[in-house]
Amino acid sequence: MAFGDIFSDGTSWDEAAVLHDAELWLVRAKLAVLEQDAIEALRGTRGIALASLWPPSTVIRIVAQDGRHLGRVRREYPWALPERWIAVPLPPARPHGPYRSAEVAAHALLPASPAPSPSPSPSPEEESMP
């Protein structure tokens, strides 16, 4: 019996394509586990912290601020100089860059500071007080 003949509905499958898809699923699952491990390692950190996705490689790093996951930074063309880093925020935001270092790219992932609230205008009674 050939691989493509195992389905009772007569569907034939390309064995190489099925195996390729299965390998991609396994790689994605492994990366998801590695990312969760790195996020867990960053819990409880203070300030901006980076952890390698796949130690000892530093090409992809997970970024957290005060233990809260912000996204990733990845080195574009790791063999080339000068370094170029891309900031990859959590979805639905899109990657942006390049930046000159992983740290600068990590800072680009920080949420925008809220606009300062305007000072309340003094009441007419307060204006007349000396």
Image (spheres, rainbow, N blue to C red):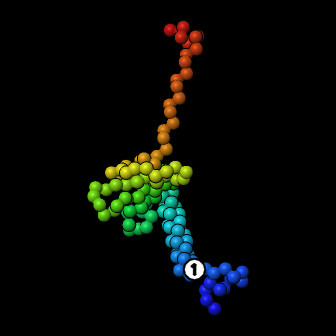
- Residue beneath the point at 66% across and 85% down: 6
- In percent of width and height, residue 127 lies at 53, 11
Q: Quadrant of residue 2?
A: bottom right
- In percent of width and height, residue 116 lies at 50, 31
Q: Is residue 57 above or below residue 19?
A: above
- Residue beneath the point at 49% across and 54% down: 71
- In percent of width and height, residue 10 lies at 69, 82
Q: Is residue 14 above or below residue 31?
A: below
Q: Is residue 126 left or right of residue 65?
A: right
Q: Nearer the viewer, residue 48 or 62?
A: 62
The amino acid pointed to by label 1 is Asp
- Residue beneath the point at 46% across and 46% down: 110
Q: Quadrant of residue 121?
A: top right
Kind of element beneath mark 1: loop
> Which residue position is annotated with label 1?
14
Q: Nearer the viewer, residue 43 or 5?
A: 5
Q: Is residue 79 left or right of residue 116?
A: left
Instruction: Tell which residue pokes out farthest to the left in this image.
Output: 81
Residue 25 visible within the image: yes
Q: Is residue 75 above or below residue 33?
A: above
| Count of marks placed on residues | 1
Residue 26 visible within the image: no
- In percent of width and height, residue 23 lies at 52, 75
Instruction: Tell which residue pokes out farthest to the bottom in this image.
Output: 1
Q: Quadrant of the N terminus?
A: bottom right
Characterize the local packing of mark 1: few (<14), some (14-19) or many (20 or more) Cα atoms within 10 angstroms: few
Q: Is residue 67 left or right of residue 6?
A: left
- Residue beneath the point at 38% across and 63% down: 58
